[in-house]
Image: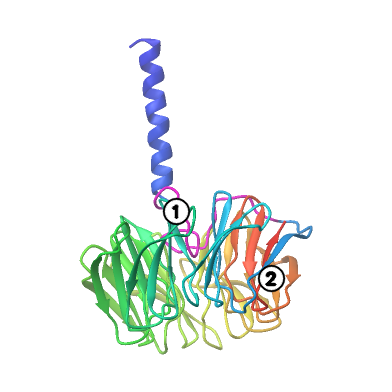
Amino acid sequence: MGRFGQFFLLFAALILVLLLWYVSRGEVGTSMFRGNVHRTGVYETEALPRFTGEKWVFSTQNSGNPSPVVVEDTIYLGSMAGRVYALEAASGEKKWVMEIGPVETTPAVAKGIVYCGNRDGVFFALNAKNGEVLWRFATGGALKSSPVVAGGAVYFGSADGRLYALDAASGESRWNFETGGEIWSSPAVADGRVFVGSHDGAIYAVNSQTGELEWTVKTGGWVRSTPAVNEGVVYVGSRDGNLYALDAVSGKVNWVFKTWQEIFSSPAVADGRVLFGGFDGRFYALDAGTGEKLWSFAAEDQIWSSPSVAQDVIYFGSRDRYLYALNLKTGRKIWKFKARGWVRTSPALDAGIVYFGSDSGEFHALH
């Protein structure tokens, strides 16, 4: 083989490695709640270990900002004022605004389309460049479940108790699956299954292609926490105060960790640790394999926020109005930032910048 042939094989091998790297993190160009289709809360980006101040702040003029997503140079977020925003990541300047009705969910972005639902039960697909409505789909209840895009489908839950699978390009229904309660939990996708919690107190695993039930596990209270799936295990919290670790294939309970109050926070999974906050005001790090508590950190009020992780730093908010940054391994507080409202959103991380909103209606970029 000549030198050109060797070079071609090396180039082809490099392309294959890069493609596998992208595929392992979901479809190319996607961004969604909890960072990926597995909902692990891990961002493959630079951390912000040292806080120097606000880069910019943007007012949505309404309380209860959902969590943002970042795609290249653009931030996408919804608002209870009824708008979806596209902002310049560098400056916070508006690129476009689209009125779709009150938004309580985090958008998902894939292949130039922004997917988002409203409180009136209507699910939208918007052009990511200008906000133009591409299609819409009506459900029978409010949408408080953030969508996930995988395998050409978009999955989300509704307060009508159904988990929906739509064709991501056309909005046509592929299937829907009925649970016994409202769905506020956001679905996770892994290994041909969709995992979601319901207000009927159960966690469901549904075949991603057919919508057929594979297994269900009952808990002692509603499940609003979003499942995180890592290495064949599903981690999810419940109103009963338990964090569950379930086998992704069978639903078998591997272990349960008990806190004193309900768990709304969606867990992150990083470096062999399961990370989440509770209504008891404590933030926990558990051994992912055994459920043993490795450390905990006391905030000053309830923690609804779902943590995000980059490198060795964890970020989450609290009802005490602080956004916290903790060391992943030790739980030591690195820094905290006080907003003017309750921080219950899940931060989005990109290139050493932390983006999050608070109930004051302000949206922050910290650097």
The residues bearing labels 2 and 1 have C-alpha atoms spaced at a distance of 25 Å
In the shown orientation, is residue 120 left or right of residue 330?
left
Badge number at residue 86: none
Tell me where residue 283 sits by quadrant: bottom right
Residue indicated by mark 2: 323
The residue lying furthest to the top in this view is: 2
Q: Nearer the viewer, residue 269 or 180?
A: 180
Residue indicated by mark 1: 30
Reading the chain from its start, which is encountered first: label 2 or label 1?
A: 1
**Is residue 46 a member of the stretch shown in magenta?**
yes
Q: Secondary structure at mark 2?
A: strand
Q: Secondary structure at mark 1?
A: loop
Q: Residue at the spot x=62%, y=78% of the render? A: 62
- Over which residues does the magenta segment extend? 25-48
Q: Residue at the spot x=55%, y=49% of the render? A: 72
The image shows residue 92 at horizontal and vertical percentages of 66, 58
**Residue 251 visible:** no
Q: Residues within 10 Å of mark 1 (few under 14, many from 20)?
A: many
Task: Identify which amino acid the numbered label 2 is placed on.
Answer: Leu
Q: Which color scheme is applied?
A: rainbow
The image shows residue 350 at horizontal and vertical percentages of 60, 53
Tell me where residue 80 sits by quadrant: bottom right
Q: Residues within 10 Å of mark 2 (few under 14, many from 20)?
A: many
Q: Residue at the spot x=47%, y=87% of the render? A: 239
Q: Residue at the spot x=29%, y=59% of the render? A: 170
Q: Nearer the viewer, residue 123 or 197?
A: 123
Q: Nearer the viewer, mark 2 or mark 1?
A: 1
Magenta: predominant secondary structure element? loop
Quadrant (top left/top right/bottom left/bottom right) for the N terminus: top left
